[in-house]
Image (cartoon, rainbow, N blue to C red):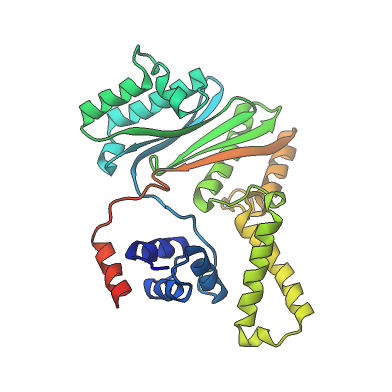
Amino acid sequence: MAFTATDVKNLREMTGVGMMDCKKALVATDGDMDKAVEWLREKGMAASVKKAGRVAAEGMAYAAVIDGAGVVVEVNAETDFVGKNEKFVDFVKGVAATVARENPADLDALMACKYNGTDLTVTQQQQEMVLVIGENIKVRRFARYAEGVSVPYVHAGGKIGVLVNLETALAPEQVTELGKNIAMQIAALNPRFWDKSQVTQEVLDEEKKVMLAQMANDPKMANKPEQVREKIVMGKLNKFYAENCLLQQDSVRSDVFEGTVEAYIAHAAKELGGEIKFKDAIRFEKGEGIEKKQENFADEIASLVKG
């Protein structure tokens, strides 16, 4: 299987490994991306795999609670300049208000709804914005929580929007700080799972395989008895949970609470005199998964592929 300059770039973005090593991995695995990732991890070069398709388009991710409904939306534009335009920002907020009011079943249904405060549909209002601003604008996705207490957080002016949903009988204002700090954690670390109970056996088996391969490639570990290596792997799996599962992660707001996120929630519940349960969350990062036009960087990689 052949591979391209774009494959090298994508592998680099997924793993954080240098371009030359990414090229070696693709050569060694005949261009198979999944096997190349595994090859790099087994060699100890890639500590973890970042999500493919990182930010590649502009616009805004926005989260809010509107009339009791938690909403998070992403609307894309062509340039970062437009993403900060006041008219564009107002349009995004209007889309969020429409989602809150209409509770559309999917994106097609949303686009057919009356845009908040107008007689135009969301599609028509989007077309109006394209004419006014002069760039392609597209409502991409949304999510909505009607139940529980939702807490929104918008990072870096719309680069990331997070909506945390908590189950509690406490008043929303009592858990706002807690919810915001959890949302900041999700924005910063983008955990793969909310809780270790969600990690499938398939994922655990893959992690165990990688860890054993890493030890086999380490002269200090290769000669250790199998049962010793198995015990080491079990210890490393606990570290995997702490790195990849929200509730088992250490709180990034160590100035507020030192310990795991689940311990922080339990502490806050005790302090406030009620029960609080993390129920769900949505994290939208603007442009994730949308491929952007390659510029000079692609030429640099192409020279490596040819070499």
Q: Is residue 151 above or below residue 208?
A: above
Name the residue rendered at 34%, 26% in the picture. 91
Closer to us: 35 or 223 = 35
Does residue 64 appear to the left or right of 258 in the view shown?
Answer: left
Apparent side of residue 195 relative to residue 84 in the rendered image (left or right): right
Residue 174 lies in what quarter of the image?
A: top right
Q: Residue at x 30, y 78 (%)?
A: 307
Q: Classify residue 94 by image quadrant.
A: top left
Residue at 54% x, 77% y is: 43
Find residue 296 and report its horizontal and vertical position in percent.
23, 62
Q: Residue at x 71, y 27 (%)?
A: 169
Taking the view exactly as shown, the residue that stands out farthest to the front is 1
In the rendered image, the quadrant that contains the N terminus is bottom left
Residue 146 can be seen, yes or no:
yes
Residue 59 in the image: x percent, y percent? 34, 39
Q: How many marks?
A: 0
Left or right placement of residue 247 versus residue 153 in this view: right
Residue 240: x and y, percent? 64, 62
Q: Compared with residue 158, is residue 191 higher up or lower down, i.e. above or below?
A: below
Q: In front here: 80 or 269?
A: 80
x and y percentages locating residue 199 in the rendered image? 68, 53
Confirm whether residue 73 shows in the render.
no
Q: Residue furthest top?
A: 119
